[in-house]
Amino acid sequence: MKLDKLILVNWDALRSDEYEMGNMTLLTGPTGSGKSTLLEPVQTVMTAAHQNIYSYNPGQDETTQNSRSSKSKRTLWSYIVGAEDNLFARPDGAHGYVAAVFKPDEGEDGKPFTALIAVAARVDGSGERRQAVQERLALLLIDDATLGLNDLVNYDSSYNMCVVEVEKIENHLKARYPQVMNLRVAKREYLCQLYGRFRGQRNVSFSEAELAAKAWSQSIAHKPDRSVDDLVKTQILEYDIQQLPQRITQISGLMRQVHQLRLEGDRLQANVVRLEGIEKALTKANAAYETAVQYQLAHSQRMLQGDRLRYSKPMRP
């Protein structure tokens, strides 16, 4: 499966739209241009914003998500209301959606499906203590369907966009698509079924889904590079001094397995040669046996014919 497109509705300052993805998609731009803001909805779909799995990247001029000086921590709810420090693009609250449309890669079996995160959030508090809080969350999987922006919004007579309310989205989609599964707030079950679909199964164990989700989250985590050498070592070669002994042990074990497999392959090849020789000998023996049977049959027929001629002669008085 590959990510075919991303659909965003009321996600931070990004335009509510469909974002097409290719076999390789490159995000480029200056600091603060919104590269991480576009990556976070994909992380949201892949982790369901599950505690201890997801980790939103820090914003501009910040080093870590957990150390943001006077700035508020980024959350799923803050993205929906468009929070930036104590300012909110949607101060009256909002309904927002992140949908990822997955399709089989070329030559791959399977059917397309859409993973949808539906969020309703509001701004609580007053003055400088305002913050984004959760109102409603829904996790949906729509099988054999590729959703579009028009599945999540409507337009009035003036062509103003009206977002479908989160509490109505399930029935709204069921009127259009037959296979809509609303897992509500069951994040564990959502992840099990999401990663199950990637493997052509209905679901996988949570431990497997959790490892896959963490790996995905870590792959896009913010990693400041101090030098080109560090970039190559940590990002390209994935060097990790703590895991190096374990990896050496794993490689050594794999090499032993390869050696044993090579010996087993040689033994099997030798057995194949022997079996081919036995097959040829059996073929010759079978042919010789058939020839002997034919000779014996011909000899018996001649003997029988001679007996018939001898007993068929008239006897003289």
Image (cartoon, rainbow, N blue to C red):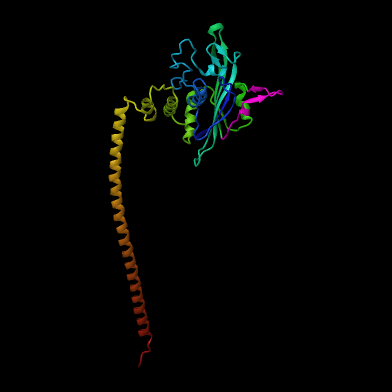
Residue 150 magenta-drawn? Answer: yes
Quadrant of the rendered structure where residue 222 is? top left
Can you tell which quarter of the image residue 113 is in?
A: top right
Task: Please indicate, yes or no, whether residue 137 appears anywhere in the rendered image.
Answer: yes
Q: In the rendered view of the protein, which quadrant contains the C terminus?
A: bottom left
Given residues 44 and 180, the one toward you in this image is 44
Image coords of residue 149 (percent x, y): 61, 28
Q: Is residue 316 above or below residue 12?
A: below
Residue 266, image x, y percentages: 29, 48
* Rendering coords of residue 260 (x, y %): 28, 42
Q: Give the farthest residue toward the bottom.
A: 317
Residue 268 to residue 67: above or below = below
Give the extent of the magenta segment: 144-163
Judging depth in this view, the residue of 281 and 305 nearest the camera is: 281
Is residue 202 visible to us here?
no
Q: Residue at x 35, y 75 (%)?
A: 298
Name the residue rendered at 46%, 18% in the picture.
Answer: 58
How many marks do you count on the picture? Answer: 0
Does residue 55 appear left or right of residue 316 in this picture?
A: right
Q: Quadrant of residue 128?
A: top right
Q: Position of residue 131 (x, y in %)?
A: 53, 11
